[in-house]
Image (tube, rainbow, N blue to C red):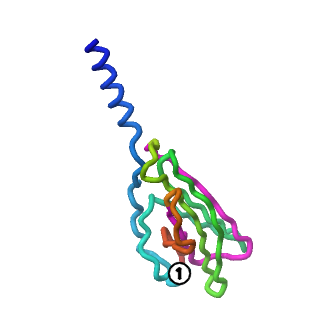
Amino acid sequence: MRRVLRFLIVAALAVGVGCRPAGEPDAAPANPAAPAFSFAPDAPPYDGPPIRFEVTTEGPATQFRWSVTAPTGGWEVTFEGGRTYPPIAHGAVKVLIVRPGADEMVTQTQEEHDGHYRHGNLTAKTAELLVRVVTRGMTGDDDDYRVAASWSAPE
């Protein structure tokens, strides 16, 4: 009987290591090469999960790609729109990240949540990724975007 009880305790501890309450992944480092213009100039620093942001130009078109590293369980990444400021060839992409609530039990295995957006009439010279992070079930400010990453074309 003691062996069975000991086995059950060890098994419960092993399962508990793989699942834990929803936490924050490591924050992305700040990007020191921010463009001079921003659609969110007064926003606080981005403090969400790590993000990679790539921009490529092909003729008169610009392709924006991003990848958010977040746990597999409970995290959602959604494209919300693109913006441009043609006078200075600046582009921006808006992304919504929904994280699980504090009371949710989710797996903590990391995965890439990828997305892309193509703008056909702008050859961008600078760009930024604007991200809004909200907790599932909570209401938040619909315009609380933060600059998660920025890009400048090589000269």
Residue occupying the point 46% across, 82% down: 42
- Predominant SS of the magenta segment: strand
114 shown above or below 107: below
Residue 100 percent coordinates (x, y): 49, 52
Residue 118 percent coordinates (x, y): 69, 66
Residue 91's quadrant in the figure? bottom right
Q: Which one is nearer the viewer's eye here, 19 or 25?
A: 19
Residue 19's quadrant in the figure? top left
34 shown above or below 24: below
Q: Amino acid at mark 1?
A: Ser
Task: Decide whether residue 43 is among the magenta residues.
Answer: no
Residue 147 percent coordinates (x, y): 49, 72
> Which stretch is magenta?
108-134
Residue that carries the numbered disc 1 in the rendered image:
38
Q: Secondary structure at mark 1?
A: loop
Residue occupying the point 46% across, 42% down: 107
Q: How many marks?
A: 1
Q: Which one is nearer the viewer's eye here, 122 or 154?
A: 122
